[in-house]
Image (cartoon, grey):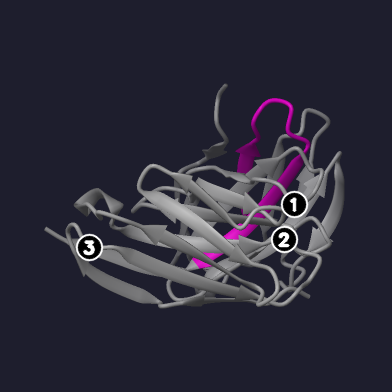
């Protein structure tokens, strides 16, 4: 069974630009969650999508948005990039039934200059 | 919401020693407790998990113990090897669907 894939793996943007990251979950998984990881901050939860609907949301500004398609693939968008948005963005998939294992992708490393 | 505290933040051991990482959580509704290992340049990968109906689970050199009364669970790695060097995260899903992760423990195993 193929794992979670994320594209692109690396990205360099400048302040003010916007970026879209993509995540393909494990086949059969309906939940996709997004996390921001920065040194010293651990894994900060952004949002979770289940069956094309945002089911949970973390404490991030509205510049961070996402969506999920009917095939469970998900995209995350960050508008008006700031230097502080530089981070590793991880997505994780699961069946979505709650209190279960999340399977992480390799992440997209975003650098904002 | 759920609050998960993980200690220590850094753990340095000699090859062959044991390593113990502890996490405490706050939400009594948590019933599933996974541990993830993150190697450099990779996403976290599940290494072991435990559900609230058992107190201990082992898988070769790693084990997890759970004390629901005290609301803490621990990861034990015996006979550590250099390839065990990584960042380890605990998580405790509350009644909602999304787990709260600990801040991570950087384990360094010296040859």
The chain letter under disc 2 is B
Which image quadrant: the N terminus of chain B? bottom right
Which image quadrant: the C terminus of chain B? bottom left
From what the image shows, is residue A52 above or below residue A109? above
Dominant secondary structure, magenta: strand
**Residue underneath mark 3:** B17
Q: Nearer the viewer, residue A62 or B13?
A: B13
Tell me, yes or no, if residue B103 can be seen here.
Answer: no
Q: Which residues are magenta?
A: A19-37
Say if mark 2 contacts mark 1, CB within 8 Å: yes
The chain letter under disc 3 is B
Q: Residues within 10 Å of mark 3 (few under 14, many from 20)?
A: some
- Marks 2 and 3 belong to one chain: yes
Q: Residues within 10 Å of mark 1 (few under 14, many from 20)?
A: many
**Residue underneath mark 2:** B93
Residue A6 location in percent, x, y?
55, 39
Q: Residue at x 73, y 73 (%)?
A: B2
- Label 1, secondary structure: give it: loop
Q: Residue at x 55, y 24 (%)?
A: A2
Residue A4 location in percent, x, y?
57, 35
Q: Residue at x 83, y 30 (%)?
A: A70
- Marks 2 and 1 belong to one chain: no
The chain letter under disc 1 is A
Residue B91 among those drawn in magenta: no
From what the image shows, is residue B76 above or below residue B8? above
């Amino acid at each position: 069974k193929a794992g979670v894939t994320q594209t692109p793996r690396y990205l360099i943007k400048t302040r003010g630009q916007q970026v879209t990251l993509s995540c393909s979950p494990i086949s059969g998984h309906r939940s996709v969650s997004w996390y921001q990881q920065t040194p010293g901050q651990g894994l900060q939860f952004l949002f979770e999508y289940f069956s094309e609907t945002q089911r949970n949301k973390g404490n991030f500004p509205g510049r961070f948005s996402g969506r999920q398609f009917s095939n469970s693939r998900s995209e995350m968008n960050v508008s008006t990039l700031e230097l502080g948005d530089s981070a590793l963005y991880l997505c994780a998939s699961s069946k979505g039934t709650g209190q279960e294992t999340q399977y992480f992708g390799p992440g997209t490393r975003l650098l904002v200059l | 919401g759920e609050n998960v505290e993980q200690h220590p933040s850094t753990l340095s051991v000699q090859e062959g020693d044991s390593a113990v990482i502890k996490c405490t959580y706050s939400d009594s509704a948590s019933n599933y407790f996974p541990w993830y290992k993150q190697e450099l340049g990779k996403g976290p990968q599940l290494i072991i998990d435990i559900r609230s109906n058992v107190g201990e689970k082992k898988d070769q050199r790693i084990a997890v113990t759970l004390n629901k009364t005290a609301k803490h669970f621990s990861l034990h790695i015996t006979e550590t090897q250099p390839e065990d060097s990584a960042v380890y995260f605990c998580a405790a899903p509350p009644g909602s669907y999304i787990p709260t992760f600990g801040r991570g423990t950087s384990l360094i195993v010296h040859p």
